[in-house]
Amino acid sequence: MIKVYAARITEFPTENLDSILATLPEERRRKLLGFRFLQDMLRGVTGDLLTRAVLSQMLNCRAAELEFGTNLYGKPILLGHGQNTSFNVSHSGDWVVMAAGPSGRIGIDIERINVMDPEVARQFYTKEEYNSILSHPLHQERLLQFFRIWTAKESYIKATGKGLSIPLDSFSTVEGDAIAKVQLIEGDLWYFRTFSLEEGYVLTACADTYDFNAELQTLDIKSIVGVK
């Protein structure tokens, strides 16, 4: 079963940041320290901690035993004994989210709702998706549908592991005026699941299996790092 998790960076124990960074692999630590803004570093560190905590529990091993690599398109993947488990991480604003489970292809995307540029929808969405936005009479509903489609598209692209080598307008994620629960894309069935997290955010996961846990689990980042 694919499970979805979320952690809020505003709860990060910044007073312990140095000691937390010291527990991460040197190459990853250098990359995180290269961020210009603290918020960006906290999103990155939280993503790493969330990934290691969830996967070590799923695989019944110590976090230090987990090995990671990337595919040809740069998507992070598990190596070694975790090859039958897939995961994906996304962040926006105050939140970091993760989807993981026994599936070869999983993607997730979270976006904080802001302004909508109709030209972006016309240029990068399919005609069906663009019309699904226009089918909503109120501006707020159109805005929400715009970001639902955006997160669905991003989650699919991330699930395939091919990144933006896939044109955004080459596939549709809607059925009528709603996000499709299942869609045939390039000969494969893909399953979409939108989760409620917090007002002002949209979160969608995509996988090659329908077996999603219905509930999103919110984790306290302090409990992950073992501080009070």
Image (tube, helix red, strand yellow):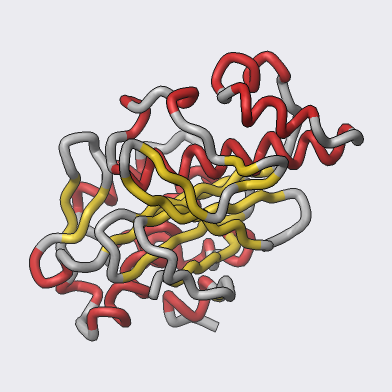
Could you tell me which residue is drawn at 90 percent across and 34 percent down? 137
Is 167 or 218 nearer to us in this picture? Answer: 167
Q: Is residue 88 left or right of residue 223?
A: left
Q: Indicate the position of residue 108 as horizontal and vertical percent values.
A: 46, 52
Name of the residue lying farthest toward the left: 80
Quadrant where the N terminus is found in the figure = bottom left
Report the residue at 63% width, 18% height from top: 120
Picture layout, residue 79 above or below residue 212: above
* Relative vertical location of residue 63 with respect to residue 33 in this rendering, above or below: below
| Nearest the eye: 74 or 196 | 196
Please state the horizontal and vertical placement of residue 142, each as a whole percent of the image: 79, 34
- In percent of width and height, residue 194 lies at 60, 57
Is 225 in front, or is 165?
A: 165
The answer to which quarter of the image holds residue 122 is: top right
Quarter-wise, where is residue 193 in the image?
bottom right
Left or right: 21 as drawn, with respect to 119: left
Residue 225, horizontal then vertical, whole percent:
42, 75
90 left or right of 22 in image: right
Q: Residue at x 30, y 80 (%)?
A: 58
- The image quadrant of residue 61 is bottom left
Q: Which image quarter is the C terminus in?
A: bottom right
